[in-house]
Amino acid sequence: MAAPAGHLRPGRYLAFFALIVVALYALVFFTGSGKPTPKLGIDLQGGTRVTLSARNPDGGDPPRESLEQARSIIERRVNGIGVGGTEVVLDGSNVVITVPGEQGDQAKTLGKTAKLGFRKVVTSQPVTPAPQPSAPPASAPPSSAPPSSSGAPGASAPPSSPANGGGGAAGAPRQQPGDSDEQTKKEIEEARSLRQNPDLLSTDQAKQAAAAEKAFAALNCAPNAADPLVGNDLTDKPLVACGDKNTMKYLLEPEFLPGTEISDASSGYDTQNSQWVVNLNFKSEGSRIWGDFTSKNVQKQAAFVLDTQVVSAPTIQSAILGGQTQITGRFSQAEAKDLADVLKYGSLPLSFESSDATTVSATLGLASLQAGLIAGGVGLLIVFIYCLFYYRLLGVLTILSLVFAFSLVYAVLVLLGRWIGYTLDLAGVAGLIIAIGITADSFVIYFERLKDEIREGRTFRSAVPRGWSRAQRTILASDAVSFLAAAILYWLAVGDVKGFAFTLGMSTVLDLVVVYLVTHPLVAMVSRSKSKFLSNPKNLGLGAVQQVGTERKAARPAPGRPNVKEA
């Protein structure tokens, strides 16, 4: 931004600033559907903070690359399901999700969807009711499930809800890996020996039937049953799993297509057949594998397996080439959207479980906000009193400039909340409070430069352009250092510290806008005023320095005359 020169036209700069303010508030009040207030973070309006602990099959620390990939996918999933103002960060081997407001229930389910894959259904059977304590345990032999009767092209499936857990779906109480590693490994091995036994696909029919009977009988499909294979199943072996809202048990072949090959999934309404459907697209390699599989398995079922749970098992109606697949069935709108979200965002390189969920009350957030506003108000009042006492009329210009700066900051915060989902937290409020000092510092630098010029014997009017020319270099250097520090802090920090760095850097930039477009033009207007009140140095807080300047000017020798002193 070019510096105003000595022939500055203050009205143009003030008009340009007014145009910026009008444009910003027009966007605030006449665009978007939200309230004209900034979005508040969890520590100001309350919310939920969920910590997801990664589960590694070998019990070791998860690779950092896999954790970062999982964090990125969870963040995309959060954005995809419309949970606003959410922050997803890594904390060691954990993923921490912070959701402000009343969307905590959604936050608690974000870590449920983890490893997604496609397996062919070998056989299935309904879940039998739990036997009475007096009755001997009963088991049913496996039986082939009839294909879906839907005649829609592509694939069809009965409605299923990914939110319901089967065989200990995510969300059920599980043993933490750190509680008893030996016990956890033992449970995993026992579950694998039954539900991933190679005999499940043996060519020996008797051996296969015996293995399937044991696996089906051992599998507990109760909604709250713990499943040690969640995140620990082997994709190259068969699997016995629950599905269809815990009403069916499936025997599945090894995974033939990983969920990472899905490029996109969405739900929609098929007006021709009057039903909700799920549209599924694959990447190039996934499209080739899916096309080859569907060509060889028409009228057979393909199971979409999420953390050892079958979330959908559609029947293939015809060969699907090109990667575009439509899943039909008796879906409700919510079920179709849930399935699409699972398919689109459910494939993570690691499996997670919720190890901690903390709810912050709105009352506590309101108290924090009030405390922050009080602190900011006290700081602002002290600045006002100092400016009025020390600079008098120039202090009034300082107060006006701070008011204009606040109007800019407020509008920008509202718009950033709408456009990029930025939320103002307590650390951000702290950044804004510190920015008051940075803005006031720019005024102090300018006014002290004016005093230096007046001490040299110049008038207030002639001191303004010369003082500004010297002050702006110092102001630019000071704000550049502050912005650079805020930018580095934002880049290196995580969590709440990012909010502090962001508001500090933003306020520093807006400080330059106000100083160039408001403060200096207002001072220039006052210096050119013909009003006796405005031209009186005492009213400007410049009486003492003007007296010094007058005395120095009088003490200088007249031009052309030597200053002769008595010996």
Image (cartoon, helix red, strand yellow):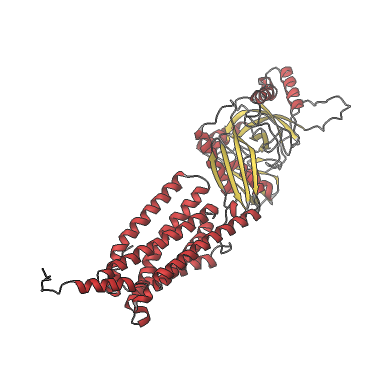
Quadrant of residue 182 in the image? top right
Q: Is residue 565 above or below residue 121?
A: below
On the rendered image, what quadrant is the C terminus found in? bottom left
Farthest front residue in view: 567
Count how many numbered circles sit on residues in the image. 0
Is 565 on the left or on the right of 479, as rendered?
Answer: left
Is 328 on the left or on the right of 218, as rendered?
Answer: left
Quadrant of residue 40 in the image? bottom right
Camera-nearest residue between 351 and 302? 351
On the rendered image, what quadrant is the N terminus found in? bottom left
Camera-nearest residue between 97 and 270? 97
Q: Is residue 429 visible?
A: yes
Q: Is residue 312 visible?
A: no
Farthest right residue in view: 134
- Can you give x and y, in whole percent of width and height, for residue 270 in the image? 65, 51
Quadrant of residue 388 in the image? bottom left
The residue lying at 37 percent from left, 64 percent from top is 444
Q: Is residue 37 above or below residue 48?
A: below
Camera-nearest residue between 137 and 43? 43
- Can you give x and y, in whole percent of width and height, for residue 560 in the image? 10, 73
- Can you give x and y, in whole percent of width and height, for residue 277 in the image? 65, 47
- Can you give x and y, in whole percent of width and height, for residue 311 in the image? 67, 38
Q: Is residue 416 above or below residue 58?
A: below
